[in-house]
């Protein structure tokens, strides 16, 4: 993943119709995932190191049970972006971003940030006051994304260890740092269209 908050190229537009209707060539559609998206999402994640590769089954569960808290970016029939997340039952005022993947062909468009904002604009995100995620120290692209969102929203970003390399991973995985952005600004939610 190489999130880039640069302006979109003129020939590319990002839309938010959840039904995934027909779009013009080159336009990006943000929509709810479907179970049939599972293999493409698994392939996209594999092509975006250093993301951890979940099982194909895990991705299918996200596309079905957690579809309301995940978003797919599709262009010309290809899945070029994916964000998975959920509202933790123990912290329902937060939205946890699990993975952000943007294919090489869609980088430089600010797509990662747009997908996250599309999730926060959904009715299911009403009442969310913080965005949280975990990131390893060496994942510069992810840190750049969440630092840019913190600046964009004028909301502080706090970092703390959530899962320690030795305590939680027995030395087999780098420490996962929790990034928490909040309090989030109140968002204007679309009133006349279906949820993204």
Image (cartoon, grey):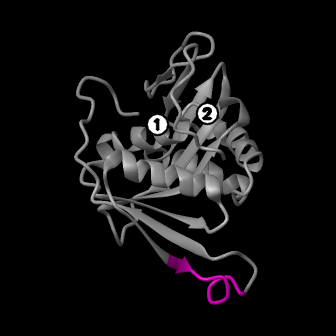
Q: Do the residues under discs 1 and 2 have CB atoms within 8 angstroms?
A: no
Q: Which quadrant of the view contains residue 3?
A: top right
Q: In the rendering, at what x and y percent does residue 153 appear?
A: 33, 47
**Label 1 neighbour load within 10 Å: few <14, some 14-19, many 20+:** some
Residue beneath label 2, please?
108
Give the foreground label among 1 and 2: 2
Q: Of callouts 1 and 2, which one flags the residue occurring earlier in the amino acid sequence? A: 2
Relative to 67, residue 139 above or below: below
The C terminus - image quarter:
top left
Whether the magenta-drawn stretch holds residue 162 is answered as yes
Q: What residue appears at the point 51 percent right and 19 percent down from the top-left corner?
A: 13
Up-down relation of residue 6 to residue 139 (above or below): above
**Is residue 65 at least partly visible in the picture?**
no
Which residue was labeled with disc 1?
A: 114
User: Which element carries disc 1, helix, strand or loop?
Assistant: helix
| Of residues 180 and 93, the one drawn nearer to the viewer in this rendering | 180
Tell me which residue sits at (57%, 40%) in the image. 4
- Nearer the observer, 159 or 96: 159
Disc 1 and disc 2: Cα gap in Å? 12 Å
Q: Which residues are magenta?
A: 161-170
**Which circle marks residue 122 in the picture?**
none
């Amino acid at each position: 993943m190489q999130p880039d908050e640069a302006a979109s190229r003129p020939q590319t537009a990002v839309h938010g119709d959840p039904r995934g209707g027909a779009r013009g060539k080159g336009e990006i559609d943000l929509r709810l995932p479907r179970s049939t998206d599972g293999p493409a999402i698994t392939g996209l994640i594999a092509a975006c190191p250093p993301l951890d590769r979940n099982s194909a089954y895990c991705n299918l569960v996200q596309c079905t049970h957690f579809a309301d808290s995940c978003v797919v970016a599709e262009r010309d029939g290809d899945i070029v972006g994916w964000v998975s997340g959920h509202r933790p039952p123990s912290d329902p005022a937060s939205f946890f971003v699990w993975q952000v993947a943007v294919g090489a062909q869609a980088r430089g468009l600010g797509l990662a940030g747009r997908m996250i904002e599309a999730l926060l604009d959904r009715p299911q995100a009403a009442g969310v006051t913080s965005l949280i995620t975990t990131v390893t120290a060496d994942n510069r692209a992810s840190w750049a994304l969440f630092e840019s969102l913190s600046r964009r929203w004028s909301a502080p970003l706090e970092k703390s260890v959530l899962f320690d390399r030795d305590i939680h991973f027995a030395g087999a995985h780098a420490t996962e740092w929790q990034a928490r952005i909040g309090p989030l600004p109140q968002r204007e939610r679309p009133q006349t269209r279906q949820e993204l």
